[in-house]
Image: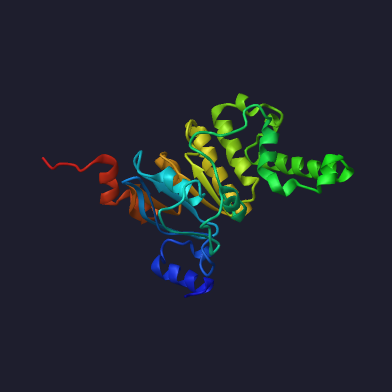
Amino acid sequence: MPNKHERSVLVQMETPNLIPERDLGQIPVLEAKHLGIDFGGLTAVDDFNIAMGKTEISGLIGPNGAGKTTIFNLLTNVYKPTRGTILVDGYDTAGMSMVQVNKMGIARTFQNIRLFDKMSVVDNILVGFGNQMGTSLATDLLRLPAHWRREREFRDRAMDLLGIFDMQRFANTEAGNLPYGAQRRLEILRALATEPKVLLLDEPAAGMNPNETEELMENIQKIRDEFQIAILLIEHDMGLVMGICEVVGVLDYGRIIAKGTPDQIQNDPQVIEAYLGKQEVI
């Protein structure tokens, strides 16, 4: 059996044009091998494969119902795969809980926003810090000085994260009172608070106007550069996908039908047929 380094070399040989050059020579941060899931007699995802470099931005596109969100649920262990393997930094996630997978370095946002509406913006981010915040039980129960120092430290870190989207002014606003686009951005920041290695974004531009989407593109690249993480996104806004993704996979009926650079994908006949239907020549 090949070791981690040998496995990395094998992946690069199989997909030399897909892993960014800056990430070559390293173990892919996220791999899925022959991943699939069946619901009863229905195959929702079949033979899905991915190998992501540590600082790669990739996109997953496809018609509604193609299985994109199901794949995110598999990668985060919301669903247990019927077959296949998922590796994070070379370590198998089989048998792990969603919390354990998150601790391994996989964080996500959701197609339907899942914030704590009645909590403040800053407190939503503090939830993301989770286990990083704890001191000893006695320190927390007795509210000793160390407890307050720790809380101030993480509130400062939360404000720094809010600064990525220029949202410091909303720190004490109830999350449910934010405009829709700002709620989307807050969910991304809460995911970043978990210190992920891979950030999965499910429809991050949904509900955003063109100016907000353009700003989101810039900020996704900024997040990748500043945090040195990989980002995999599902998105219907082709301008966003083609504008920032280095690799794009196209899913149709639970299977990858094309994978390549944005230019390759935009000119692939199978992709055009999947989105537009086969065109009859008259």
Q: Is residue 273 above or below residue 87?
A: above
Q: Residue furthest top?
A: 177
Q: Nearer the viewer, residue 196 or 47?
A: 47
Q: Is residue 242 visible?
A: no
* Quadrant assignment for the C terminus: top left
What is the tally of numbered marks visible in this picture? 0
Q: Is residue 145 above or below residue 57?
A: above
In the rendered image, residue 210, in percent from the top left (x then y), is placed at: 47, 33
Instruction: Please give the name of the residue rendered at 52% of the width and 49% of the height, measured from the top-left corner.
Output: 76
Judged left or right of residue 194, residue 252 is left
Instruction: Please give the name of the residue rendered at 54% of the width and 28% of the height, measured from the top-left corner.
Output: 180
Q: Is residue 33 visible?
A: yes
Q: Nearer the viewer, residue 29 or 226?
A: 29
In the rendered image, residue 43, in percent from the top left (x then y), is placed at: 33, 48
Q: Nearer the viewer, residue 73 or 5?
A: 73
Judged left or right of residue 109, residue 254 is left
In the rendered image, residue 79, in percent from the top left (x then y), is placed at: 47, 47
Q: Is residue 138 above or below residue 4?
A: above
In the rendered image, residue 64, in percent from the top left (x then y), is placed at: 35, 38
